[in-house]
Image (spheres, rainbow, N blue to C red):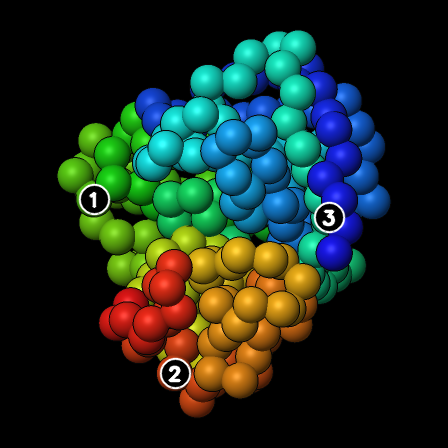
Amino acid sequence: MDRPTKMTVTGADRVATDTIRLTLDATWDARPGQFAMVWVPGEGEKPMSVVASDPMAVCVRSVGPFSRSLCSRTVGDMIGVRGPYGTGFTLMKDANALLVAGGMGAAPLAFLANELALGNEVTTLLGARTADQLIMPEAFTNTGGLHIFTDDGSSGESGIVTSSLDRFIWDTDRVYACGPERMMVAVLDAALAADVPCELCVERYMKCGVGLCGSCHVGEICACTEGPVLSGERLNGTGFGRTARDCAGRRVPV
């Protein structure tokens, strides 16, 4: 297993009410959809989606002890990073791309939108519970058409981000999605019904990031090495959206 590389925080910017974007003093050869294992001394290590590669950046939402500690980092602080790991999204040319982002799923899709904007028509459906939890909407405005959805109607349309898929999916060449698993199941079902290729960035509990622990399996698929980006065809029939594993390896309902 790789040892973490020490990196210095060069930027710590709040991109939502509880979410920080950390920019680091490194340039990575990373693709949209790949992830980093981020280590904070004394706190542990967690996987984080790569938001940009030059300079490298990750987004972290403050939800537990580790993420709260990471969100408290300021310019000049050191953290450990290893990677990049996993598979990335397939890039296209001269095509219509539909991005469906829910919650923290906006982080890797912002990176993807920036790459796809060079030679493609990009439309993004961005969802969150409330307006102040929308992550980097400006990243999607700058790279194509943006449609916002919030559960409480505080910004954009009221409702969940997948409620309007039928308005967009029939005019796209490929769908990309990242967010809560139930949301991505809805995207997968819609893409299969429309016979449109789709790629989903799977979020599962990961301890190692290199295929050793088995905690991130989706059926027989090891999400950290064979994913986290997986095609809809590959995920169909695996039990995706029904069960996952918790930190102790126990199967739990999604």
Q: Residue 225 in the image: x percent, y percent? A: 66, 67
Sooner in the amino-acid sequence: mark 1 or mark 3? 3
Q: Residue 152 in the image: x percent, y percent? A: 16, 39
Sooner in the amino-acid sequence: mark 3 or mark 2? 3
Residue that sits furthest to the bottom in the current view: 237
Residue 151 is labelled as 1
Residue occupying image coordinates x 46% and y 18%: 72
Under circle 3, the secondary element is: strand
Under circle 1, the secondary element is: loop
Residue type, mark 2 in image: Gly
Residue occupying image coordinates x 33% and y 36%: 63
Is residue 12 found left or right of 91 in the rendered image?
left
Q: Quadrant of residue 154?
A: top left
The residue indicated by pointer 2 is: 239
Is residue 254 found left or right of 171 in the rendered image?
left
Residue type, mark 3 in image: Gly
Residue 9 appearing in the image: yes
Residue occupying image coordinates x 47% and y 83%: 219
User: Crowding at label 2, few (<14), some or many (≥20) Cα neighbours within 10 Å?
Assistant: few
Image depth: mark 3 or mark 2 in front: 3
Residue type, mark 1 in image: Asp
Residue occupying image coordinates x 26% and y 72%: 253
Is the residue 58 above or below the residue 15 in the image?
Answer: below
Q: Residues under labels 2 and 1: Cα distance?
A: 27 Å
Q: Residue 241 in the image: x percent, y percent? A: 35, 73
Residue 195 appearing in the image: no
User: Crowding at label 3, few (<14), some or many (≥20) Cα neighbours within 10 Å?
Assistant: many
Q: Residue 146 in the image: x percent, y percent? A: 47, 41
The residue indicated by pointer 3 is: 83
Closest to the observer: 57 or 130?
Answer: 57
Q: Quadrant of the C terminus?
A: bottom left
Image depth: mark 1 or mark 3 in front: 3
